[in-house]
């Protein structure tokens, strides 16, 4: 009797056939891809899936990242942005103070405020509502994409309101979408080990489920490159995929490459380009019910972002103006980028730049 033992080549061929036939990949498929060194085959599959979903269009937005406070009760092991109340560098801005900052950097093309910050327990929930309200009243034409699922869980705890009640209050003030942060790795073991004392796995997912039920479209992330295994990353994607099956409320998946705390950290303390590209490509292959996978230039750099456009990515984020969270760790990338540079970057990859709004409605196609 002949026993046929599958080889890596035959296993890859099986996965290729599944992708070509539109069959859903499994946990085992995803782990195999991570452990394979055949980056070109993985990238080629991801590119074909992306071209089928989006053609050659690559999306970006004119946005500004805003941070009302860096005071935070959590002590996540990977974060260098947070401060304690009274610590040097700690701040909490009022609505008028934030408006003053925005007016220094604002121009009429800005379409989105991307707002995240610390879990500051020294101010009431109403502070966070009023922050949104002040911005929306001053800039009514700009979409407010604010707060992570972990922040919504925090607001629920300090206010005594349910997730739905918290979100409804924020929506009345002007909230139109949630950011994707706070996911890190959706593993309770990981969260305990990395001191992620904010929302747990089920809470993170339930906030997004609740938001989707209220009609909010949201974003979601995965912070990779520390203690998690390849299986942890794939399980994370499966959690997100299952919720998307249920609600269809996610707009985009954003793999975030972990940054070292020290900006002088050497290359061995950073994710390799190989790992970053593989993660983007595998995300595209695993998340068959997502239209977009984002390449976040803040964490992987502009040149690798350009390469990722042939490996499954269909979004290059936005202009940002001044990013702080990754740069308070060890990010060595630009804090922002111009519209012209983004267009040049996308065209250089043989793709078509498309300016979008928060919800992926096309504003202008740069043929």
Image (cartoon, grey):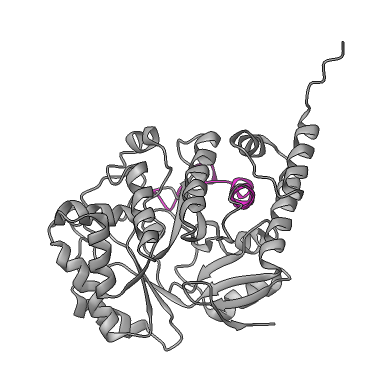
* Residue nearest the observer in this picture, 16 or 242: 242
Residue 272 included in the magenta stretch of the image = yes
Q: Among all residues in the image, which is located at the extreme top? A: 1
Residue, x 73% and y 71% (percent of image)?
A: 350
Residue 298: percent from the left, percent from the top?
49, 62
Q: Quadrant of the C terminus?
A: bottom right
**Left or right, residue 322 beside residue 312:** left
Quadrant housing residue 202: top left
For residue 220, which quarter of the picture? bottom left
Residue 83 appearing in the image: no
Q: Would you place residue 96 above or below residue 291 in this image?
A: below
Residue 14 versus residue 248 in the image, above or below: above
Q: Seen from this angle, which residue lies furthest right?
A: 1
- Residue in front for this viewpoint, 365 or 40: 365
Expressed as whole percent of the image width and height from the top left, the position of residue 194 reads 35, 38
Q: Residue 136 placed where, x, y %?
A: 29, 80
Question: Is residue 101 visible to the viewer in this orientation of the structure?
Answer: yes
Q: Main secondary structure of the magenta part?
A: helix
Residue shown at 44%/72% (left/top)? 320
**Height in image: 141 above or below 72?**
below
Image location (x, y in percent) of residue 217: 43, 65
Side of 67 where 361 appears, left or right: right
Residue at position x 32%, y 80% in the image? 102
Name the quadrant of the N terminus: top right
The total number of labels drawn is 0
Q: Residue at x 58, y 54 (%)?
A: 289
Magenta segment, which residues? 261-285
């Amino acid at each position: 009797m002949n026993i046929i033992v599958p080889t890596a080549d035959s296993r890859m061929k099986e996965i290729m056939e599944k992708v070509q036939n539109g069959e859903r990949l499994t946990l085992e498929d995803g782990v195999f891809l991570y452990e394979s060194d055949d980056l070109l085959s993985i990238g080629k599959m991801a590119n074909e899936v992306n071209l089928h979903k989006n053609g050659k269009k690559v999306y970006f937005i004119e946005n500004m990242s805003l941070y009302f406070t860096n005071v935070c009760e959590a002590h996540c092991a990977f974060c260098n942005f947070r401060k304690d109340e009274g610590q040097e560098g700690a701040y909490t801005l009022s609505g008028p103070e934030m408006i003053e900052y925005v007016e220094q950097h604002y121009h009429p093309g800005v379409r989105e405020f991307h707002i995240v910050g610390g879990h500051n327990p020294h101010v009431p929930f109403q502070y966070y509502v009023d922050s949104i309200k002040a911005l929306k009243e001053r800039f009514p034409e700009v979409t407010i994409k604010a707060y992570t699922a972990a922040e919504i869980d925090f607001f629920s705890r300090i206010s005594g309101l349910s997730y739905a009640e918290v979100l409804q209050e924020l929506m009345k003030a002007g909230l139109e979408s949630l950011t994707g942060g706070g996911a890190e790795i959706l593993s309770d073991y990981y969260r305990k080990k990395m001191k992620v004392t904010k929302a747990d796995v089920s809470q993170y997912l339930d906030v997004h489920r609740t938001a989707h039920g209220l009609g909010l479209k949201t974003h979601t992330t995965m912070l990779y490159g520390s203690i998690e295994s390849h299986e942890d990353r794939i399980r994370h994607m499966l959690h997100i995929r299952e919720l998307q099956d249920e609600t269809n409320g996610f707009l985009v998946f954003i793999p975030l490459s972990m940054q070292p705390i020290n900006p002088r950290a050497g290359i061995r303390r950073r994710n390799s380009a190989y790992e970053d590209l593989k993660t983007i490509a595998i995300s595209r292959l695993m998340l068959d019910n997502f239209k977009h996978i984002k390449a976040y230039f803040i964490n992987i750099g502009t040149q690798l972002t350009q390469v990722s456009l042939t490996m499954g990515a269909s979004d290059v984020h936005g202009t940002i103006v001044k990013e702080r969270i990754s740069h308070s760790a060890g990010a060595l990338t630009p804090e922002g980028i111009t519209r012209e540079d983004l267009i040049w970057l996308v065209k250089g990859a043989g793709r078509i730049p498309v300016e979008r709004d928060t919800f992926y409605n096309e504003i202008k196609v740069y043929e």
